[in-house]
Amino acid sequence: MTDETIAKSSHRHHWRRDLVEVAALFAAVAIADSVADTVVHGPDGPVLLWASAGALLATAGFHTWWSRRRGHAPPAATPPAAAPDAATPAARPGGATTLWRMRTTVRDEPGSLAALGLALADLGVDILSLQTHPLGDGTVDELLLRAPATLSPTELTRAAAEGGGRDTWLERADAHDLVDVPTRVLHLATRTALDAAELPLALRRLLGRCTIRSIPAAGSGAAGGSVPSVPDEGVWEGTVMRLRDPSGGAITIDRPYLPFTPTEFARARALVELDARLGPRAVRPGDVLTLPEGGEITVRRAGTGDLDAAREMHERCSPATLSQRYHGPVGDTDRYLHHLLSPRFGRTLAAYTTSGRLVALGHLLWDGDETEVALLVEDAWQRRGVGGELLRRLVTMAAEAGCASVYAVTTASNTGVVAAMRALELPLDYQVEEGTLVITARLAARPPAAPARSTTVRRATGG
């Protein structure tokens, strides 16, 4: 419809309305004249007119009084909004909260994430961060949640199901999980680039609670047998990943409680490729320690390059010392020394004299989800504080790697290891089984790392 048509229609309706109003006015005048004529010429005409006027005045006065009374009255209350349930966590702002990591699978369609967020919001849950892992039949959403401390895991899982989530997995989180994923991955890549021994730890931090095993290459002299065939691009089978180890052999990552996603597989493979491109890295210089008796030793990281010196030290150790360390007769040293000195299986500290003689080894071994510490000190250097110094440094390294505890396997007669563990001043658990003593130290309350009071430390200037 054009503007001209609208204008003509409005004009036509305007004069029709005027005609209706004029006709109504004439009709009202005619009716008023008839009524007035009837009343005036009637026997009680004036009385009726005065009574009508009084009734109209009374009605007007009552209306004015009622309007003023309502004007001074308080405004009518609006219908109250639906009050939240007293049991709803959102009704208690400022209460204690808990961090959770949730992983759930939702449909790959618009609005699925919004439905999940609304279901969690109804319980007062705040989504702090979100990662998405696309799959063929949906999307895995990994969320970092801040929830009221009163909420149970069952309630959170039920809310996720109401929001369209399935196969929901939930575990407690901590402040370290607040770091966004790109920052965490860059940090892990930097640590891997600086130290070849960081790769297993970087993979564990990247993938969460999982078991990482390094299988040495066949013919390396290490225990472990043959290596399963792993293609260059690796293998991913649900809860298991297999990747080629750049140093030879294979790396197996197992997480039975939660399947891996294609995104996690790609990240793990990228870290392994980074380690392969960088190749062997130089060992950091050690510290020169002055012992209470005046002698000096150098403590530094050890690797497979220290294999010959480790063999010679084993030959100088007594059978009793070797038996306490390895819990039985010692056979071919090459069978296990290559394994112990490999950075893929843990970290090793070596103590050298000023003449270049290896006198002690301390091992921090990644044993699945647990961490073992082990010491071997040459007989002539025992009871001089060397083993205790190595143990303190190993425990510090374990704490920096995020380990919750370390354990040592020995015998009750090995008083040196027992005394060194007690000197850590950490909570200890003792377990004795068939003559074997397992001492576990919990690292949550570890004291600040510091050298022993009787030992002077300075940085080595070389090697």
Image: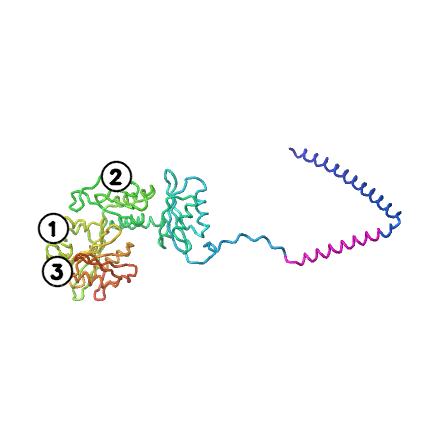
| Whether residue 360 is visible | no
Residue 365: x and y in percent read 22, 52
The Cα atoms of the two marked residues, 3 and 2, are separated by 46 Å
Which residue is depicted at the point 75% across and 36% down? Answer: 16
Q: Which mark sits nearer the N-terminus, 3 or 2?
A: 2
SS assignment at label 3: helix
Which of the pair 208/393 is nearer the observer?
Answer: 208
The Cα atoms of the two marked residues, 1 and 2, are separated by 35 Å
Q: Which amino acid does the dot numbered 3 rest on?
A: Asp
Residue 334: x and y in percent read 14, 49
Q: Which residues are magenta?
A: 48-74
Q: Residues within 10 Å of mark 2 (few under 14, many from 20)?
A: few
SS assignment at label 2: loop
| Magenta run includes residue 60 | yes
Q: Which amino acid does the dot numbered 1 rest on?
A: Gly
Which of the pair 52/420 is nearer the observer?
Answer: 52
Q: Quadrant of the N terminus?
A: top right
Q: Quadrant of residue 11?
A: top right
SS assignment at label 1: loop
Residue 60: x and y in percent read 76, 54
Q: Which amino acid does the dot numbered 2 rest on?
A: Asp
Q: Quadrant of the C terminus?
A: bottom left
Of circles 1 and 2, the one toward us is 1
Which residue is depicted at the point 16% across and 45% down? Answer: 220
Q: Which residue is mark 2?
A: 232
Which residue is depicted at the point 24% across and 45% down? Answer: 279
Tell me the number on the disc at residue 379.
Answer: 3
Q: Which residue is mark 1?
A: 331
In the image, taking residue 120 as reference, residue 252 lies left or right, namely: left
Q: Residues within 10 Å of mark 3 (few under 14, many from 20)?
A: some
